[in-house]
Image (tube, grey):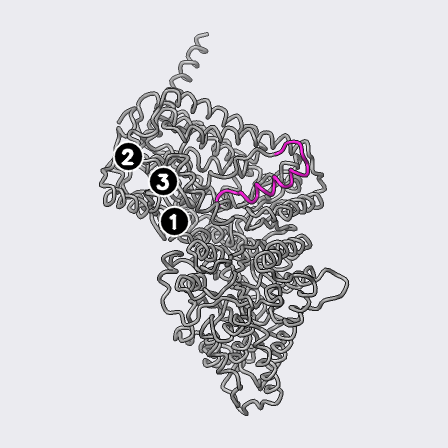
């Protein structure tokens, strides 16, 4: 029983932290700021694929 | 910052970078609502990427990276909104996110290039981007899918420079720089060999325009399946063209039957058209309210969404119908409460011409900056007829009618009556004093009416504000160029001050 | 070579749309039927009592009014026509048929209508939907539209006889013109041709813009002249080309190319003879209108024809012409801002050039181009490129 309560407490705490983190990410637009950093890397990745000429 | 409209200077979120500095504070209720919707959209996207085929597709096709900006796209299209308008916007745009994820999932699951399921591919008919999809309503066992929508159309709204790479490829091939960037971009994707390889057969169409038609001819060289072209009359308002158009539909259906082995199912068709008619009835009610002093579903909250269910949805997805029902409920409640859509409604406007894809949130800017209420746009003013749900012969004519009245095309072709004269009638109906006239630099269809528009607007005492743009190529006319054209008119001609001065000029040249 | 007797006469007549020959026909009571495109069978506009004139805007300098109405981002041919219409140059027309060929021409015709470019009481501008494929449905559509929107309209407004006999008479007239033009055109296959591309362009253009019955005696005499005309021992051309693409209603453009060293052996452009000047072969059993329309859509090489077979046919047609007329290369030109030919040019250059091995000069150009130094330089460079290729033993 104690273990269950402890487990639940940890889960709730983790959820609360995640929730607060998500609020921060949301409000300060951190998701988009990260996505913007990923784009140049992705472009280099896409450049690798061969481009057969038009038949 | 707070729960009132225009309580926060929105221009200050732009600092010349790719993203905005932060999201809006809209008061506790609306911010919480927006946050939960943001979580939901991320959930949809994570779910999409957790599918292995979708992950492969994401890493194979360059155009997929544009979807990283989806949350920003939604932020742009909800900028400054509060209360019912915010909820309507989310109902629509979040729905589009889910729908597009579903479309792409079906493409990637069938994509032979990335190890997709050949059986799924055989059950797919590839459709042209700019064509109506009601032909698929009678093939319940087949999936109609358009490759160009997720590759070009949607990305062009997600990021302003998403298509320039492909436009450049088309120009390197030899396509002149003055053509419409949409077919040029589509062709660029074909030249780069970046369309998924799937489908049992393909249908191409001469809608929207001459440029679309021509791009198709070259793109087809990449297709590995039989292709049929559906020719829709140019002068579709001429009643003498209807039997020809209906026969074109019959021929297209026969082609799909021959290629796929499926038989046309009238029961399925009529059921879906019932759905479609229901959606049309809801849309009519939106327009009804927009004609009043308290319009509710306007501007951005009509434009892209109407495209989606009218053309792409076509009545096949009851989720669209349910969504519209819920939007109507919000709308009617807000109308009953006389909810204002802007903090100060100074002008009522009709948006004519084709919108800039890279600035699809422009109507929202008109509201937020100048109190111009964008009641309705030309692309949304498509057919509001109710189509037959019983008569088989009439059904062919109905489908032909829909194909002719595809978004934008229903005004850019068909003649003076639908391209020019209808505008004045609509200004009266909606009690509009202003016309925002989009002038798409690469469009050869409506540009020829330029002088006539000016003369007629002057005769009628309407404010006609030209807004020049490059459709999908912001290098031709930036977002700020578009804003400047309105700013100049508002200041120089009308001597007005903006509701939000921070929105008059701000640097979003690098922004998504 | 000895000058052709009527070349100068036709050059002068073509300086104006409402010229002496047109006025003479009008004085006889003939109706002047304006047209802008191949899409409507020309023969239907040349019924007894009518003559067709394909609209152009010779000696265009400014297009300010046309540009005001249509902006600087549209086809100059359309703008030039609108400019002329607003100036009153088309007042002589009794009607105008616009076949919904392209959006810009449709807008131009509608602007002309809205701005009352022709003020005659019975003048009408008829927009006619035309097909974009060459299958059976397209044929029945064209037949139907020609019947209700062309023939019935002419009969209703002007009492023109549109019966089968009248159609056959118009075909007979059309065919004689085509026979003569084709005969003249065949000489271009000679390696020492007895007719220049420019001269041929003048006669062909005249056949589109002037009353055919009045032009016929000139064509007959010219054909006779050509039968015995001696070509020059040495000519100025270094290579032979097919000139393809969009609207060319100014023979000076052909002259420019020839002055730069490239003989224009075949004219695969709008206002040209390939197609456009082929006889219509009628049988006695089938409906005449259907036969006329069938030939029109089967032969049409306009890029607005969108079915796969037609798309491929256009390239193979050009390839065949280049072989038949012994061309060394292809000059593919396109009017600025033309959607149809812009894409077609790019596609054809890829298929005929990169894949087919033909040297292709791919250019876009303004409406008025007769004295363009830029274009002359491009053609000269193209000529040198072909010569070099020949010297290096490359196949052309």
Q: Quadrant of residue C377?
A: bottom left
Quadrant housing residue C326 = bottom right
Asked if residue B392 is among those painted magenta in the image, a careful observer would answer yes
| Disc on res. B362 | 3
Q: Which mark is residue B453?
A: 1
Same subunit, tags 1 and 3:
yes
Instruction: Give the Cα distance between marks 2 and 3.
Output: 14 Å
Whole-angstrom CA distance, mark 1 to mark 3, is 21 Å
Lower sequence index among marks 2 and 3: 2
State which chain disc 3 sits on.
B
Is B17 or A39 nearer to us in this picture? B17
Q: Nearer the viewer, residue C100 or C247?
A: C100
Name the main secondary structure of what is drawn in magenta.
helix
Does B240 sit above or below residue A30?
below
**CB within 8 Å, label 1 to label 3:** no
User: Would you name the residue on which mark 2 appears?
Assistant: B10
- Mark 2 or mark 1, which is nearer the start of the sequence? 2
Range of magenta residues: B388-408
Query: How many numbered circles does the render carry?
Result: 3
- Structural crowding at the residue carrying mark 2, measured as other residues with C-alpha within 10 Å and reported as few (<14), some (14–19) or many (≥20): many
């Amino acid at each position: 029983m104690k273990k269950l309560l402890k487990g639940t407490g940890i889960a709730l705490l983790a959820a609360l932290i995640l929730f607060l983190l998500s609020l921060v990410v949301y409000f300060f637009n951190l998701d988009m700021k990260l996505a913007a950093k990923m784009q140049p890397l992705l472009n280099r990745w896409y450049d690798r694929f061969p481009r057969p000429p038009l038949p | 910052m707070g729960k009132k409209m225009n309580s926060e200077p929105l221009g200050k979120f732009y600092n010349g970078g790719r993203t905005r500095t932060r999201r809006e504070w809209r008061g506790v209720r609306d911010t919480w609502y927006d946050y939960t919707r943001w979580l939901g959209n991320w959930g949809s996207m994570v779910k999409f990427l957790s599918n292995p085929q979708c992950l492969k597709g994401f890493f194979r096709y360059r155009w997929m990276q544009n979807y990283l900006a989806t949350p920003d796209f939604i932020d742009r299209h909800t900028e400054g909104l509060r209360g019912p308008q915010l909820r309507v916007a989310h109902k629509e745009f979040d729905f589009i996110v889910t729908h597009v994820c579903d479309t792409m999932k079906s493409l990637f699951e069938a994509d032979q290039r990335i190890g997709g399921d050949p059986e799924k591919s055989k059950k797919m008919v590839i459709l042209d981007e700019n064509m109506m999809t009601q032909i698929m309503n009678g093939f319940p066992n087949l999936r109609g899918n358009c490759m160009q929508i997720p590759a070009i159309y949607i990305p062009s709204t997600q990021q302003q420079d998403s298509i320039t790479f492909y436009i450049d490829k088309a120009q390197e091939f030899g396509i002149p720089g003055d053509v419409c960037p949409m077919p040029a971009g589509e062709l660029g994707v074909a030249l780069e060999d970046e369309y998924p390889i799937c489908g049992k057969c393909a249908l191409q169409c001469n809608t929207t325009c001459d440029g679309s038609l021509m791009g198709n001819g070259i793109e087809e060289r990449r297709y590995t399946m039989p292709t049929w072209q559906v020719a829709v009359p140019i002068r579709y308002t001429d009643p003498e063209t209807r039997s020809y158009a209906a026969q074109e539909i019959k021929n297209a259906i026969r082609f799909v039957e021959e290629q796929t082995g499926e038989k046309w199912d009238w029961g399925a068709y009529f059921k879906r058209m019932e759905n479609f008619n229901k959606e049309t009835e809801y849309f009519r009610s939106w327009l009804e309210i927009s004609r009043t002093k308290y319009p509710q579903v306007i501007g951005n909250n009509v434009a892209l969404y109407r495209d989606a269910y009218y053309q792409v949805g076509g009545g096949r997805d009851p989720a669209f119908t349910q969504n519209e029902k819920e939007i109507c409920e919000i709308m009617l409640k807000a109308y009953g409460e006389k909810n204002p859509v802007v903090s100060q409604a100074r002008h009522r406007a009709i948006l004519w011409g084709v919108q800039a894809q890279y600035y699809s949130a422009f109507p929202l800017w008109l509201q937020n900056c100048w109190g111009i209420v964008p009641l309705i746009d030309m692309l949304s003013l498509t057919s509001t007829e109710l189509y037959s749900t019983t008569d088989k012969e009439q059904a062919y004519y109905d489908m032909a009618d829909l194909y002719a009245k595809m978004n934008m095309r229903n005004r850019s072709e068909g003649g003076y009556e639908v391209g020019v004269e209808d505008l004045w009638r609509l200004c009266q109906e909606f009690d509009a004093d202003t016309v925002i006239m989009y002038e798409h630099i690469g469009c050869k269809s409506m540009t020829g009416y330029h002088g006539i528009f000016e003369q007629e607007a002057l005769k009628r005492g309407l404010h006609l504000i030209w807004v020049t743009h490059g459709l999908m190529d912001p290098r031709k006319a930036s977002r700020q160029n578009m804003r400047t054209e309105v700013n100049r008119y508002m200041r120089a001609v009308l001597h007005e001050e903006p509701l939000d001065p921070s929105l008059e000029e701000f640097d979003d040249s690098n922004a998504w | 070579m000895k000058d052709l007797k009527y070349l100068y006469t036709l050059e002068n007549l073509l300086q104006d749309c409402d010229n002496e020959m047109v006025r003479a026909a009008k004085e006889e009571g003939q109706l002047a039927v304006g047209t802008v495109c191949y899409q409507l069978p020309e023969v239907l506009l040349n019924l007894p009592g009518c003559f067709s004139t394909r609209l152009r805007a010779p000696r265009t300098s400014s297009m300010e009014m046309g540009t005001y109405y249509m902006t600087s981002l549209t086809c100059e041919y359309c703008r030039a026509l609108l400019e002329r219409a607003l100036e009153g140059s088309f007042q002589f027309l009794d009607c105008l048929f616009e076949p919904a060929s392209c959006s810009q021409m449709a807008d131009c015709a509608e602007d002309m209508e809205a701005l009352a470019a022709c003020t005659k009481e019975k003048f009408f501008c008829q927009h006619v939907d035309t097909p974009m494929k060459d299958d059976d449905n397209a044929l029945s559509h064209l037949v139907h539209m020609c019947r209700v929107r062309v023939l019935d309209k002419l009969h209703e407004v002007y009492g023109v006889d549109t019966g089968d006999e009248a159609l056959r008479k118009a075909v007979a007239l059309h065919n004689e013109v085509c026979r003569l033009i084709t005969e003249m055109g065949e000489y271009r296959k000679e390696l020492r041709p007895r007719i220049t591309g420019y001269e041929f362009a003048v006669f062909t253009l005249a056949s589109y813009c002037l009353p055919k019955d009045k032009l016929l005696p000139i064509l007959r005499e010219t054909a006779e002249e050509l039968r015995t005309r001696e070509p020059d021992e040495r000519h100025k051309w270094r290579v032979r080309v097919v000139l393809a693409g969009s609207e060319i209603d100014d023979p000076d453009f052909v002259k420019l190319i020839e002055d730069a060293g490239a003989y224009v052996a075949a004219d695969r452009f709008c206002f040209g003879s390939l197609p456009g000047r082929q006889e219509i072969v009628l049988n006695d059993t089938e409906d005449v209108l259907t036969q006329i329309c069938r030939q029109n859509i089967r032969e049409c090489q306009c890029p607005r024809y969108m079915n796969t077979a037609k798309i491929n046919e256009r390239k193979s047609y050009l390839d065949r012409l280049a072989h038949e007329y012994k061309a060394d290369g292809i000059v593919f030109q396109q009017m600025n801002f033309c959607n149809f030919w812009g894409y077609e040019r790019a596609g054809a250059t890829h298929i005929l050039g990169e894949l087919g091995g033909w040297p292709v000069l791919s250019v876009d150009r303004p409406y008025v181009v007769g004295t363009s130094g830029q274009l002359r330089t491009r053609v000269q460079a193209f000529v040198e490129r072909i010569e070099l290729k020949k010297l290096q033993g490359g196949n052309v």
